[in-house]
Image: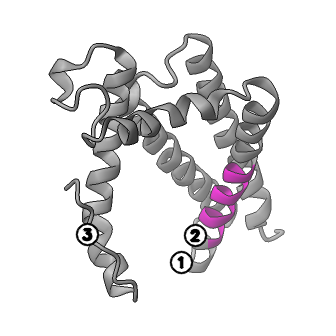
C-alpha cells in the first residue's frame, strides 16, 4: 500500500477550514454583525472549535490512511501544513475584502483608537465606564481597548524577559 501524503491531507483540510471561516465571515458581514461586541465571544469560540476540530479531523484521516499509525512528526506536519493552508487562504480573502470590497473597513476599525487618544481618558466616549456609553460603537471600542490593555499587561513579563525593557502600560 502507498504511504499517505501529509501534504495532501493538510491541503484538503486546510481548504475546508478556510472555506468554513470565509463562509462564516461573509455571513457575519451580510448580517452586519462582524464588529458587534456581543459577538466577540461567539466569534472567538467559533474560531477555536473550527480550528481544533479541523486539526483533529485531519490527523484522524491521516492516521486512518496510515494503517492506524501517526507519529509525532507526522502529526506536527499535518497540523502545521493544515494551519498554514487555512491561514494563507483566509488571509487572501481578508486582503481581497479589505482592498477591493470594503476599503473603509480599516477606517472603521481605527476610529476607536482615535477617539480614545482624543478623549484623553483611556476609554472611548466620556471615559466613565461602559455603562455610561451612548453608542454601540463606544461599547465596542471600550471592549477593544480593555482587551488590548489586558493582553499588554499579561504579556509585559514576556517582552521584558525577551530583552526589551518596555515601559509598563499606564492604563493598567
* Horizontal arrangement in the rendering, residue 169 relative to residue 163 (left or right): left
- Which class describes the residues within 10 Å of circle 2: few (<14), some (14-19), or many (20+)? some
Name the one closer to the observer, 27 or 36.
Answer: 36
Residue name at image x 68 percent, y 49 percent = 86
* Lower sequence index among marks 3 and 1: 1
Against 93, residue 71 (above or below) is below
Residue 80 position in % (x across, y down): 63, 66
Q: Is residue 69 left or right of residue 10?
A: left
Mark 1, Cα crowd under 10 Å, few <14 / some 14-19 / many 20+, is: few
Q: Mark on residue 72?
A: 1
Spatial CA span between label 1 and label 2? 5 Å
| Circle number at residue 159 | none
**Which of pointers 2 and 3 indicates the residue nearer the eye?**
3
- The quadrant of the image that shows the C terminus is bottom left
Question: Which segment is the magenta one?
Answer: 77-88
Label 2: state its secondary structure. helix
Q: Position of residue 63 (x, y in %)?
A: 61, 62
Mark 2 / mark 3, whichever is N-terminal: 2
Disc 1 element: helix
- The label nearer to you, 3 versus 1, is 3
Quarter holding residue 95: top right
**Which residue is label 2 attached to?**
75
Amino acid at each position: 500500500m502507498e504511504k499517505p501524503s501529509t501534504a495532501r491531507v493538510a491541503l484538503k483540510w486546510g481548504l475546508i477550514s478556510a472555506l468554513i471561516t470565509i463562509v462564516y465571515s461573509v455571513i457575519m458581514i451580510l448580517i452586519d454583525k462582524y464588529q458587534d461586541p456581543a459577538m466577540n465571544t461567539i466569534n472567538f469560540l467559533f474560531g477555536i472549535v473550527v480550528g481544533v476540530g479541523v486539526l483533529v479531523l485531519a490527523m484522524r484521516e491521516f492516521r486512518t490512511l496510515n494503517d492506524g499509525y501517526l507519529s509525532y512528526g507526522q502529526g506536527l506536519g499535518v497540523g502545521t501544513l493544515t494551519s498554514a493552508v487555512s491561514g494563507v487562504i483566509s488571509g487572501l480573502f481578508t486582503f481581497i475584502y479589505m482592498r477591493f470590497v470594503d476599503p473603509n473597513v480599516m477606517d472603521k476599525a481605527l476610529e476607536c483608537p482615535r477617539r480614545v487618544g482624543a478623549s484623553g481618558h483611556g476609554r472611548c466616549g466620556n471615559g466613565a465606564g461602559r455603562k455610561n456609553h451612548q453608542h454601540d460603537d463606544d461599547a465596542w471600542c471600550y471592549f477593544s481597548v480593555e482587551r488590548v490593555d489586558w493582553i499588554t499587561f499579561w504579556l509585559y513579563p514576556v517582552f521584558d524577559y525577551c530583552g526589551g525593557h518596555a515601559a509598563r502600560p499606564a492604563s493598567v
